[in-house]
Amino acid sequence: MKCKKNDSAVIGYLLKTLSPAAEKSMREHLADCDECRARLERFKRTQKLLDELHTPQASKDLVRRIMDTIVAGRKDKQKIARDIPFDNYIEALGKAAGSELMRVYAFLTRHLGRKKGEAAFDEYLQEQMALRFTTGSGSVISYEDLINTATGERSIKKAAGQATYSTVENCSFPSLAEEIGISTNPCATICRRQIKLIEKTHSLKIQCVRQRTHERGGCKFLIKPVGKDS
Amino acid sequence: MADTHVKTQDYSDDQLMAMVKQTGDHAAFKLLLKRYQKPLFGYMWRFTGDRHAAEDLLQETYMRIYQARTKFNEKFSFSGWAYRIATNACLDMRKKKSHAAEKTAGEEIITRHPSPHAAPEDEMLHNARNSEILQLLAELPEKFRAVLLLKHYEDLSIKAIAAVLDIPEGTVKSRLYKGIKQLTELAEKRGLSNEV
């Protein structure tokens, strides 16, 4: 015969949250009811399961770091830098540099007109691409490297006949333009102008043989030294 | 500073918080942080299942406590107040995450930010049992989870939990019973109860 006591009464008994009278009544009931004793065991197993959870320790210097923030008087919600992988920083910096580039292009062409704006942008790009940043630990990151990070994962392959192909996958420029609300098509403007600059500074001829960035498929460039046809 | 530190050791949590409230005493506050680091971190780790999230939340909780120090009411315990702020921080983080997920294309957010429970801590990878228990807790609705964690792991009374969550004691009991029942059913479904 099914017992009419509900699970809540059994759990309440287990957790000692019943009133003294209800607890006494439940204790007496349990002595006679196999079904409720079985239910009690069932919920006890859950408690034991929870006891098995091993909690890790917080970082040892967490309190010191929090106190540093408070003592420094920073009332804003400042994030404590933890071990963010270096690559993530580089990717974020690359995207920041990429979005800045697009904003500058959009600003200059809007205010100076396309022709003058692009000429000014080329000058700006040339200066930017020559920049080198030295970190506190002494390593050097060039602006070009940062931009390359934003313009996707690169691989360079030398095919038969000495032709060199550079393939770019997952370029973030189109999505960046969309995110920051700039109507410029970065493939047709920024990327094209970058290529021109690289051609000039490295004496190369770069031909875009596949442009599928918008489909996240990636672009492919044929790179040839100046003066050679193949 | 060292003298203050030695003296403050003997103070209760509530006395220390009263000192922080009156003078912004850093030594007293630091001692409070140390006393509560383990329980609050543990609570938020169990709530989120993610170590980094728990550390961020602990920082957020302490910052909120310090910023709201002048609003601390001595009639209530510091412990209950701290757990209330910690719970709110956990719930706020969840809301922010849900909001971010709504704003971003669904597929992408799943790929980039899997549920913390789906990707347990590196150090816990070897501990499948831990992951299984965290998974179970993660599947409980937050209102059940909070009550259950405060009762089972923090050993708070029904009255204290009611004060922390600002809900009637009857509601605490009802959520607790439902939470245990739901957890039991989930554990049995996964065959976890049998292994205990």
Image (cartoon, rainbow, N blue to C red):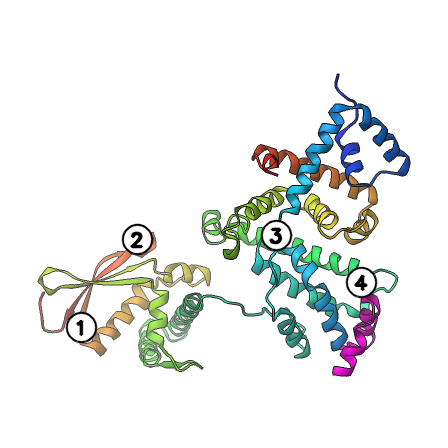
Q: Is residue A176 visible?
A: yes
- Judge whether A186 appears above or below A109 on screen: above
Residue lying furthest top: A1
Residue matched to label 2: A217
- How much space separates mark 3 and mark 1, taking CA atoms? 60 Å
Tell me the number on the disc at residue A204: 1
Q: Amino acid at mark 1?
A: Leu
Label 3 vs 2, first from the N-terminus: 3
Residue matched to label 4: B78
Label 3 vs 1, first from the N-terminus: 3
Asked where in the image residue A71 lies, by quadrant, the reply is: bottom right
Labels 3 and 1 within one chain:
yes
| Residues drawn in magenta | B1-26
Q: Amino acid at mark 2?
A: Gly
Expressed as whole percent of the image width and height from the top left, the position of residue A131 reads 35, 81
Question: Callout 3: residue from which chain?
Answer: A
- How much space separates mark 4 and mark 1, taking CA atoms? 69 Å
- How much space separates mark 1 and mark 2, taking CA atoms? 25 Å
